Amino acid sequence: MIKLVSIICFVFLPFGCVLPGSAQSSLKPRASDAVIQSDKRIVVLTNSAKELLIAFEKRDFEKFADMISPIVPQTIGGRKNLISAMKNLAEQNTTIFRYLEYTMEEPGPLVANQENLFAVVPFRLKGITFKNHEVITNSCFVGISNDDGVIWKFASCQRFNTLFPAVASKLSLPKETTAIDGTEQ
């Protein structure tokens, strides 16, 4: 069963996605981010991150793929392959695993390099397996903007380290944790 959860987490959680089901969302601000809440770029990032989660929850994989950093689909053979893989996995896994709720925190501080802005968007997903095992995963994705925060694209924190190693060291990427029935894996 741990292998099944690992596969699900690798495929869906790296994108910060919610499988279709009765997921409920909430946004929990961190006190340390109070200063940046008035930054319009953070507001746009937060709204875009919510759109990303909603697109996947509604199985709008075309919109979801549009919101992913163009570098991510290249790693698996292109946008069409990404959409096809997401559709296939969603169909296979709806009876195996179901997300019940997700909580997205406020994004972390903006970090810039010469070309892009970046910000970490932490989230927590809670789900249940077909054998009624509770699974809780804490993870994140990174928002990436090349137009000073007007449009944001996303990559998982897991993949971000590989895709943007120079910038990853400048961001505070939280460690992903997964617990099954309260036991961290």
Image: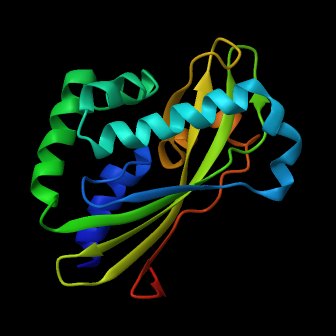
- Which scheme is used to colour this image of the protein? rainbow
Q: Position of residue 149 (x, y in %)?
A: 67, 20
Residue at x 65% of width, y 11% of height: 147
Compared with 136, 85 (above or below) is above
Q: Position of residue 162 (x, y in %)?
A: 52, 39
Residue lying at the far right of the rendered structure:
35
Quarter placement of the C terminus: bottom left
Q: Is residue 86 left or right of residue 184?
A: left
| Direction from residue 182 to residue 84 in the image, left or right | left
The structure residue drawn at horizontal position 24% and vertical position 84%, both measured from the top left corner, is: 132
Comparing 148 with 22, the one in front is 22
Residue 49 located left or right of residue 129:
right
Residue found 11% across the figure and 50% down from its top: 91
Please determine whether, in this image, residue 172 is positioned above or below residue 63: below
Question: From what the image shows, is residue 134 above or below residue 106?
Answer: below
- Residue at image point 83% right, 57% down: 31
- Camera-nearest residue between 132 and 113: 132
- Residue 163 appears in the picture as rendered: no
Count the marks: how many?
0
Instruction: Judge from the rendering whether residue 154 lies leftward or rightward of residue 74; answer left or right.
Output: right
**Residue 128: horizontal and vertical position, in percent?**
29, 75
Q: Quadrant of residue 1?
A: bottom left
